[in-house]
Amino acid sequence: MTSHLMQAYARQPVSFVRGRGARLWDERGVEYLDAIAGIAVTGLGHAHPEIAAVVAEQAGMLLHTSNVFRIDWQERLGERLCALAGMQGAFFCNSGAEANEAALKLARLHGQRKRVAQPQILVMENGFHGRTIATLSATGNPAKQRGFEPLLPGFLRVPYNDIEAVRRAAERSADIVAVLIEPVQGEGGIRVADADYLRELRALCDRHGWLLMLDEIQTGLGRTGAWFGHRHAGIAPDVVTLAKALGNGFPVGACLARGQAAELFSPGQHGSTFGGNPLACRVACTVLDIMARDDMPARAAVLGDRLLAGLRQALDEYPDVVAIRGLGLMAGIELNRDCRALVGRALAEQRLLVTVTRDTTVRLLPPLICDEAEIDDIVARLAALLKPSNPGERPCIPNP
């Protein structure tokens, strides 16, 4: 069949038509176990009945007006998120990349206010912040940047989880105005920042007058076993960006800020046509209601411990496994070779949805509503997938 879609994705030969909880069914009626939740999006599972009801009801009332007018559901969501995150102001958009764009613009405004003519933002190697030109420039993956040069200036890159590298950067440049960092690098291979590192980073930002900006697009809203990934370090950032799980599949993003950072934007300096419309904000409020009522962060902590323990036990003697990393319901299994072909093999052989990052790390992001049996099933299917059929067989088949 001829497709008129641009070739931006290496799509798998399966099309899902129905979902329920952590399960998906394709057009032939074959059932699959979803261990990626739309890449950390459907934390409350597919076709959640309460969310479906809200979408239908609000769609029949009002979808969109404009940010020229006051939007009641946007006001409610802003209040809820700021209370939850300890922030003071919210800007709503449609995606994680847009939320990070807003954060980068706040950093530039902060630099201008400090009279820094060429403000620099400190970013991390292997970090990922989006695919717009600005967020791609902030991203630390040359493979994703290739072909889109020239990238935007204004970013200094240092190794992740290395506080001495940050100190050296501060000594070399007086133009740094902010730090943008993920508490757990998702696309970077599920690499978890040490709590002490984040605390020392907060102290350095305070000392130098930098904004500490946390990209919580993938880690936010319970996935790590806390409402936000930075909570494990007990710190308070100046800016937090959210998306993915906030709408459980409905597009919505948010940039939250406190202190001076919350007062930097003035009317006309930033905007979004669709951002924060009544439907998106009502859905997000419903997501927060369900997560709070069912204590989803605590659930993710318990299930995450079970997932990591199960993986370490099941894969303990697998020679191709280099490392198993994770926090909450974020897990990465690093292998000793390119294993991108495992995504297709997992679908075909185990009816399991996984992704591969950095070419060598299998990434698991199960829905937060999984039960213990589903977590154990994910472990069993992955162990079967990675197990060599005979001592000389390699489980990972590189892409041609």
Image (cartoon, rainbow, N blue to C red):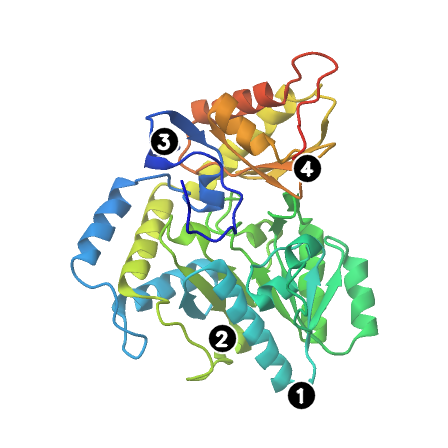
N-term-proximal mark, 4 vs 1: 1
Relative height, residue 44 to residue 319 (above, below): below
Q: How far apart are marks 1 and 3 (CA)?
A: 56 Å
* Label 2: which secondary element: helix
Q: How far apart are marks 4 and 2 (CA)?
A: 39 Å
Q: Which amino acid does the dot numbered 1 rest on?
A: Arg
Instruction: Please give the residue where the numbered disc 4 appears in the rendered image.
Output: 360
N-term-proximal mark, 3 vs 2: 3
* Label 1: which secondary element: loop
Residue occupying image coordinates x 41% and y 62%? 94
Instruction: Please give the residue where the numbered disc 3 appears in the rendered image.
Output: 26
Instruction: Please give the residue where the numbered disc 1 appears in the rendered image.
Output: 115
Indicate which disc residue 216 carries. Answer: none
Packing grade of label 4 (10 A; few <14, some 14-19, many >=20) is many
Q: Which amino acid does the dot numbered 4 rest on?
A: Thr
Question: Which residue extends farthest bottom?
Answer: 115
Q: Which amino acid does the dot numbered 3 rest on?
A: Asp
Instruction: Please give the residue where the numbered disc 2 appears in the rendered image.
Output: 262
